[in-house]
Image: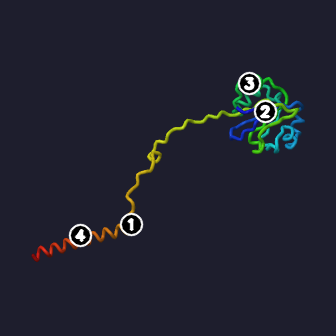
Amino acid sequence: MSDALDIPHSGQKLIWAFSYEGPIDALEALSPEELAETLGLWATPVMDHVERFDLDSMRDYGFARYLSEASGFEIGEDTSRLDALTGPVLLIHAKALNEKDTRFAPEPPFALIGRYGTSLDIPPVIGIESDSAKGQLPQGKPPKSSARISGMVATFVLIFLAVFVAVFVWIGG
């Protein structure tokens, strides 16, 4: 697995959690440009996919439960560590990041808590059970071309003439 600060662009639903050493008001006051500079990003993050809140406001619900149940991320064995955290946190979803960003380089007052993602449950490949999966489908009779129709008419006329001549030879003979 890659380093937690690496930004893979795999399409997997990921989130990076950072602690912030300071008041929540100072975290909320950071502009997108300041946030990008402090986190070591090339481009400013899309702020619609960035969450900032104080963990003390969700003490009853729990940060681990918020990440796992409410957001659907797998947190592994970090439950007790996440629930023990206090103070402001910054959550950056993968959708907030630009494709040219490949790695976080957070500077104080930010510190990485962890990177969490959804499970990659890839369903097993099931064989396709149909005639088309076996190869070419059976084709019907091809349409008759004009050359084939002409040949059939000529054959019929020749057979008729042969019978007609045979009848006259038999009657005359």
- Tell me the crowding category of disc 3: few under 14, some 14 to 19, or many 20 or more residues within 10 angstroms, Cα based: some
Q: Judge depth for marks 3 and 1 and give the one in front.
A: 1
Tag 2 or tag 3, which sits nearer the N-term? Answer: 2
Label 3 to label 1, Cα distance in Å? Answer: 75 Å
Task: State the image quarter where residue 106 is shown.
Answer: top right
Other residues around mark 2 within 10 Å, as few (<14) / some (14–19) / many (≥20): many
Q: Amino acid at mark 4?
A: Ile
Residue type at mark 2?
Answer: Ala
Image height of 71 relative to 156, above or below: above
Residue 79 - label: 3
Please give the residue where the numbered disc 4 appears in the rendered image: 159
Q: Secondary structure at mark 3?
A: helix
Q: Nearer the viewer, mark 4 or mark 2?
A: 4
Q: CA distance from mark 3 to mark 2?
A: 14 Å
Q: Residue at x 29, y 71 (%)?
A: 154
Judging by the rendered image, the residue that carries numbered circle 2 is 17
* Number of the front mark, 3 or 4: 4
Does the CB distance between marks 1 and 2 fall below 8 Å? Answer: no
Q: Which residue is mark 1?
A: 145
* Mark pair 3, 4: CA separation: 93 Å
Do the residues bearing badges 3 and 4 touch, measured as CB atoms within 8 Å? no
Q: Secondary structure at mark 1?
A: loop
**Gap between marks 1 and 2 measured at Cα:** 71 Å
Q: CA distance from mark 1 to mark 4?
A: 21 Å
